[in-house]
Amino acid sequence: MPGNSIGTVFKLTTFGESHGVAIGGVIDGCPAGLKIDTEKVQNDLNRRRPGQSAIVTQRKEPDTVEFLSGIFEGLSTGTPIGFIIKNANQKSKDYSHIKYTFRPSHADYTYSEKYGVRDYRGGGRSSARETACRVVAGSVAKQLLQDISITAYVSGVGKLELTKPYHDLDFSEIEKNPVRCPDPSLAADMESYIKKIRSEGDTVGGIVDCVIKNVPIGLGEPVFDKLHAELGKAMLSINAVKGFEYGSGFKGTTMKGSEHNDQFNQDGSTKTNLSGGIQGGISNGMDIYFRVAFKPVATLMQKQTTLNQQGEMVEMQGKGRHDPCVVPRAVPIVESMAALVLADYYLLNKISKI
């Protein structure tokens, strides 16, 4: 199965299934001599971990990362950094009812058709559990990037949406509520709504915004390897993501060029930032900001009519432990994928200047 790696210089390859012995990854291209704080890595994993609040899946996984190689006495050695996260709380019997049945809007059907075989336990390789590996690598990438800050937060759940621009938000509020929304009042409404959705056996989607500050000018490559194109690919590779926009996004289509152009200041910065920190596919030194849209989780605790492997229409109902809304746990995943892209381009930029 190709498609398990991301990056050119700073490269991550992940492996493992939701209900296998472990998931893990290999980080290749991390420069030697980088001080790696494994506590920070674990803290980022804890933000993604299942069972952390009443509004996420109640699967109880410690998600403890174990580094196998590439780090000696707290420093990267320049060799591949291998790691695993053992699965400790699988309940595979919860999925026996879908062994021969395809959940609507899930990867069950496409995996079965493409490969002729699928691991139905928790979705196997298509499970969002794989994203824990991305968080490990993304946390290492953040430590490489040092002065660059990457902050993601929930800006929308269903029809509840944050309208304040990110400049007016207090990012210190993000981790103070289980939804990870920087507006405490709206966060409370979102939490109540997610609980209501869960009680109905249903699911709901949402939006994660991300702001990246202190990005140096020059990250990104012309034509096919534009910075925003790679950020878009990285975000769209996350489970349940259906949309990506950066800068003015789709709203920019309603504006005239005289309204949309970012006028220069004498130092090269711009008076506005509708470009979202990227011009011509290359970072311009302004804040990079983007939005990521997540669909509702496909597995419902309601009865649905669906298709089985015999081509019959049957009735099924989801079982097991699932997120009623993925966006609270998606925040550290979005940050990690952004860090992986930026770390890769940071190293590519250094190579291009040699």
Image (tube, helix red, strand yellow):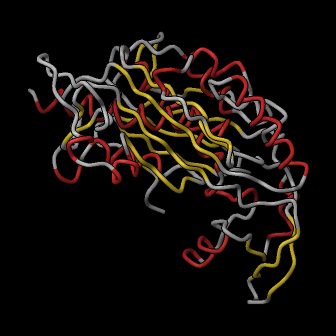
Q: Is residue 323 left or right of residue 264?
A: right
Residue beneath the point at 12% across and 33% down:
352
Task: Describe residue 300's horizontal placement relative to residue 349 as left or right.
Answer: right
The number of callouts visible is 0
Identify which residue is drawn at 40% across, 34% down: 289
Q: Is residue 56 above or below residue 202?
A: above
Q: Residue furthest left?
A: 354
Question: Could you tell me residue 263's position as x and y percent?
Answer: 18, 30
Q: Place residue 258 in its image quadrant.
A: top left
- Image quarter where the C terminus lies is top left
Left or right of 93, for residue 168: left
313 vs 176, nearest the viewer: 176
The picture places residue 109, in percent across and down from the top left corner, at 65, 74
> What residue is shown at x 33% (from left), y 36% (from top)?
276
Foreground residue among 144 and 77: 144
Establish if 233 lies above or below 57: below
In which quadrant of the rendered view does residue 191 lie? top right
Q: Residue furthest bottom?
A: 311
Q: Nearer the viewer, residue 195 or 312?
A: 195
Residue 271 on image: x %, y %: 24, 24
Residue under the image location 78 percent in, 39 percent down? 56
- Which percent across, then down, holds residue 140? 46, 24
